[in-house]
Amino acid sequence: MASHAIEVKNLYKIFGPRGEDYVKLVETGMGKAELNEKHGHVLGLQDINISMPGGCITVVMGLSGSGKSTLIRHINRLIDPTSGEVLYDGVDVCKMNENDLRAFRRHKTAMVFQKFALLPHRTVLENTIYGLEIQGVDRRESEKRALGWIERVGLQGFEKHYPNQLSGGMQQRVGLARALTNDADILLMDEAYSALDPLIRVDMQSVLLELQKELKKTVVFITHDLDEALRLGDKIAILRDGRVVQQGTGQEIVLSPADDYITAFVKEVNRGRVVNVETIMRPLSGNPEGLPLAAGTVLEAAARTMTGAQISNAHIVDANGRPIGAIDLQMIISAMVTPVQHTDRQAA
Ligand SMILES: Nc1ncnc2c1ncn2[C@@H]1O[C@H](COP(=O)(O)OP(=O)(O)O)[C@@H](O)[C@H]1O
Ligand SMILES: [Mg+2]
């Protein structure tokens, strides 16, 4: 069975008429600034290796200009690489012929944009249906599918509205409904939520997480916001100047930032909402004591449960209800307020 994974391998993108000529120089250490000064070419991406597991949300994070859009556009080949591969289910998208590429774009990928890209003279329903129309799907079938997704993103009753009659959050819901109506395995979201007001943005994150529980799409989500990355990402890759400076789970990045740059990024993060109890638990000694806590519970939630019950000890149980470790309030508080050591357990 296909895993729907995306593998980016040794990907380079150098913008300019003779990009290929400079890959070697970049490989041997020439940086973005020097390449630009000496050769007038722009280093977009440099030796990118990221595996994006099927059915998971992979977040690509980085500041403006770090190469995020350049990377996501390689996945549906709106940009051709200077060198390297982008594999989807083992097939190199960069080597597809025109027909295969067109079919891949239409049936396997859907994009959600920051600016929504809705057609102003079409209603919500007609915007949502647009992709199916292009594919020549029967009108009644299209409507049925579109109406289902419009409802799922919370827009029932707005089918006949026009985009300018909707708030930004609602327009973004239309963008999402349109992407989902295409029934693609891959969802590409380039700063899809970055223009939304903070509360609406959190709402939209919840909508995506809720849908994803069931849909299990391969989502590539781009953001420059760490909180958003930590909330959404099963996996996070951080880009800087076209290079991956760190990739891993949110916990791994928060607990063991790879360099000063990432340390500065994660400094203000609320660890209690990112770190799980099993990351800091100690081995069981004797019978499990105190409250049972499910593995995967974040520290803040654990502290709330334990404080509420006025019980300061707990044991962690795995998905089968088997006790796997112990924790107490003191350990939780220490982990929330001071950096904890990276342990083997979290790397596993
Ligand atoms: N078509 C292009 N021609 C030349 N340089 C480009 C082009 N597209 C992007 N770049 C450059 O590549 C770098 C990465 O851009 P981009 O991927 O848009 O970053 P991000 O999405 O992270 O803000 C930037 O330095 C940008 O100026
Ligand atoms: Mg961008």
Image (cartoon, grey):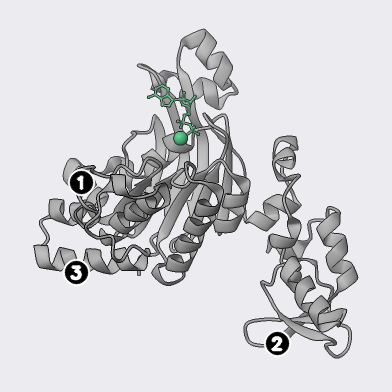
Residue sitting farthest toward the top:
38
Q: Choose the circle earlier in sequence order: 3 or 2.
A: 3
Q: Choose the circle earlier in sequence order: 3 or 1.
A: 1
Residue 215: where, in percent of width, then height? 39, 68
Which residue matches tag 1? Answer: 102
Q: Choose the circle earlier in sequence order: 2 or 1.
A: 1
Q: Is residue 155 left or right of residue 276?
A: left
Q: Nearer the viewer, residue 77 or 8?
A: 77
Secondary structure beneath disc 3? helix
Q: Amino acid at mark 2?
A: Arg
Q: Looking at the image, do the residues carrying marks 3 and 1 touch, with CB atoms under 8 Å apart?
A: no
Q: Residues within 10 Å of mark 2 (few under 14, many from 20)?
A: few
Residue 129: where, in percent of width, then height? 20, 56
Q: Is residue 140 left or right of residue 128?
A: left
Q: Amino acid at mark 1?
A: Arg
Q: Give the alpha-carbon distance from disc 3 to disc 1, as whole Å.
A: 25 Å
- Look at the image and tell me in which quarter the C terminus lies: bottom right
Q: Give the alpha-carbon distance from disc 3 to disc 2, as whole Å.
A: 45 Å
Q: Amino acid at mark 3?
A: Lys
Which residue matches tag 2? Answer: 322
Q: Residues within 10 Å of mark 3 (few under 14, many from 20)?
A: few
Q: Is residue 132 left or right of residue 313?
A: left
Q: Looking at the image, do the residues carrying marks 3 and 2 touch, with CB atoms under 8 Å apart?
A: no
> Residue 150, located in which quarter of the rendered image?
bottom left
Which residue matches tag 3? Answer: 144
For disc 3, does the CB lie below 8 Å from ligand 2?
no
Q: Give the alpha-carbon distance from disc 2 to disc 1, as whole Å.
A: 49 Å
Q: Quadrant of ligand 1?
A: top left
Secondary structure beneath disc 2? loop
> Residue 125, located in which quarter of the rendered image?
bottom left
Count of marks placed on residues: 3
